Amino acid sequence: MDIAQLVRTTILFSIVLLVFGLGLRAMPGDAISLFRAPALLLRSLLAMNVVVPLLAVVLAAMLDLHPAVKIALVTMAVSPVPPFLPGKQLKLVVREAYVYGLLVATALLAALLVPLTLAILDALFGRNMRIEPAEVARIVALTVLIPLALGIAVRYWSPGRAERLSSLASGLGTVLLVVAGVPLLVLVWPAAAALIGDGTVLAIILLTVLALAVGHFLGGPKGDDRTVLALASATRHPAVALAIAHASFPDEKLAPAAVLLYLIVSTVASAPYTAWRKRLHARSPLFVSPERGNGT
């Protein structure tokens, strides 16, 4: 096993631990909660699988960007919730069920919705992107569904043990992600930095801000739901995006660097929104009721 393989394996293991740690905090009802709220499920899919991908395609068509950047914009826009996002979302809300429900719903539906969205975009705009449903299913099962289900099972059968393991799994996962992520960033950054310019950063910021606005608006009347959907609309699963890029444009060697650049810039661009929602969350009556009413 070479260094690159070791880094990839460590990152995968860290993600599995992080999602397992999330599962240790959840109950089975949380995982399927969004399927019991069809209106919110429909709005979530509309934001993540219709509006944001359309915005990404329009921006890619309008702006004179490097082909790898255009690939990153569209592939990230059609990908499901990333496994590292719920940890951030849970710190900003009281009603936690939607965080788990959105993660599970988008993962379960990804094998259908991601290829379908790409096919529709290809028919409408000729984007020529594709991915096999089995590949999407493999990625989301390995990085989301299996570790989350294992964590929920442990929580259900042994709540005391789950409480002790949750912090350990999350902490170790975070450490391993940092340890493996730094060499990866050093390795890929020269290629990513070469893509900066010609409006690349501005395009990523613009798509991120628009995605946050779409998710916030379609999240509905409850502040927690708006926060969760806004961040999910703006932050997507990079492994799925990379798989689409590899399947559709195997000769575009800068696509992985563009996806990494998108992830970094989008995270920074989302910071003001996250800070705003964090201030609102800190001022909310946390211990009055988990259903604390409408938010802004």
Image: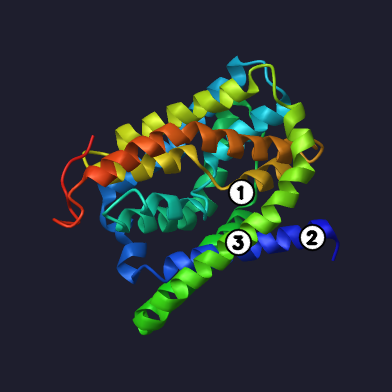
In this rendering, position of residue 222 left or right of residue 204? left
Mark 2 vs 3, N-terminal side: 2
Residue position for label 3: 175
Mark 1 neighbour density, 10 Å: few (under 14) some (14–19) many (20 or more): many
Alpha-carbon span between mark 1 and mark 3 = 23 Å
In this rendering, position of residue 220 left or right of residue 142? left
Mark 1 vs 3, N-terminal side: 3
Question: Residue 16, relative to residue 266: is it above or below?
Answer: below
Q: Depth check: give the residue in front, 65 or 7.
A: 7
Mark 2 vs 1, N-terminal side: 2
Residue 288 point in image, percent of width and height: 13, 56
| Discs 2/1, front | 2
Asked whether residue 138 appears in the rendered view, the answer is: no
Residue position for label 1: 240
- Give the structural element (helix, strand or loop) at label 2: helix
Residue 45 point in image, percent of width and height: 39, 43
Asked whether residue 38 appears in the rendered view, the answer is: yes
When asked about the image quadrant of residue 129, the answer is: top right
Q: Tell me the quarter of the image containing the C terminus.
A: top left
Residue position for label 2: 5
Q: Could you tell me which residue is drawn at 76 percent across and 44 percent down?
A: 186
Q: Tell me the quarter of the image containing the N terminus.
A: bottom right
When asked about the image quadrant of residue 217, the answer is: top left
In this rendering, position of residue 241 left or right of residue 191? left
